[in-house]
Image: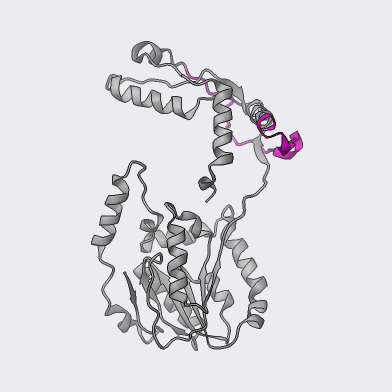
Amino acid sequence: MVKSLSNLNTDHIQNYKKFDKIDNIAFSKELKIELSKKNKRIPSKFKYDLNGSKYFEKITKLKEYYATRTEKKILKQISKEMKNIFDKNLTFVEFGSGATDKISILINDQVKFCMPLDISYDFLLKSSIKLAKSFPNLIIMPAYGDYINKFKLPKQISKKRIGFFLGSSIGNFYDKKEKIFLQNARATLGKNGCLFVGVDLIKNKKIPIYGNGKNIRDWIFVKDNVEAINNILMKGEVGQVYNIGGDNELSNIDLIDFICETIREIYPEKELGKDDYYEFVEDRPGHDYRYSLNSEKLKKEIKWSKKNNFKDSIIETIKWYSEYKKWKG
């Protein structure tokens, strides 16, 4: 369900407050459905109430979070080009508008209407007021709701509609919901509309190895680990401690060499050289040299033992990441 919040500027806040917030029953129902599935999920949209939206904006300002910073840079680069491409009397529609910082970069005198659409009622109000102060001549018509749904735009806005779905958010969809979103966005924007979608690229980054890479760890295949946990839950004694070890102690550098050697065997066309896939970086302070686990108690009392050969496990893992494309978003 999507509800319009009327024309909004600093004089129209009371109009905004006349609208009820989204019915929580619909959200509770969807959450219950998702948690009842075999593969349980909590859709990312449930994180974005007022506090969640504020926290996310703080995250986007972290040095490690390059996506927002890079996307803003790209938008600044294309802003002049966009002005030459499009006519006047434009309507901007931003799906999942958040703080509206990105769309603000593209707003110029050609844009008459702006419709931020977000699932966070309170954060939408805050960002819309901020937008109104920055662009006093812009007619701002925010709407709140789940942007995956189709909604009707107000009749008074122009038919020259440009949609924005930025921040690589399309990668958060699953179960082909990105297709539903794109179909509904097309219907919302109309046949003459266009949609800008922000997506991240898969980087060919080198693997960072702390220090000299000789730190040792005990490696175990995920299937063996999960089976061990299940056995402990079913057969273990309450209050006891059981170590789950794989009996595969390897240094970080040896593991990476082994993985890349295996990749060359499976996919000889990759032509990986040592200089292509890793680099040494400054070691972490207090970096533990070795983790070692004795799982004899688990083997004797629970009768558990790993079933998967180490190399076969590595091969299966590599093939999964290579062939199962959904993990890439």
| x and y percentages locating residue 320 in the rendered image | 54, 37
Which residue does the image show at 42% across and 57% down from the upper left? 177
The answer to whether 238 is drawn above or below residue 34 in the figure is above
Which corner quadrant of the image does residue 257 belong to?
A: top right
Res 304 visible: yes
Instruction: Check the image and report above or below for 8 versus 222.
Output: below
Q: Is residue 276 magenta?
A: yes
Choose between 84 and 275: the one closer to the eye: 84
In the depicted structure, whether residue 2 falls above or below residue 240: below
Magenta-tinted stretch: 264-293
* Residue 68 spot, x, y in % from top left: 56, 61
Q: Residue at x 70, y 38 (%)?
A: 277
Where 255 sits versus 270, above or below? above
Q: In terms of depth relative to the viewer, which is nearer, 210 or 88? A: 88
Q: Hey, which quadrant is residue 181 in on the image?
A: bottom left
Q: Residue furthest top?
A: 300
Query: Does the magenta segment cover residue 328?
Result: no
Q: Residue 86: where, in percent of width, then height?
A: 61, 82
What percent of the width, then of the height, locates residue 209? Answer: 65, 35
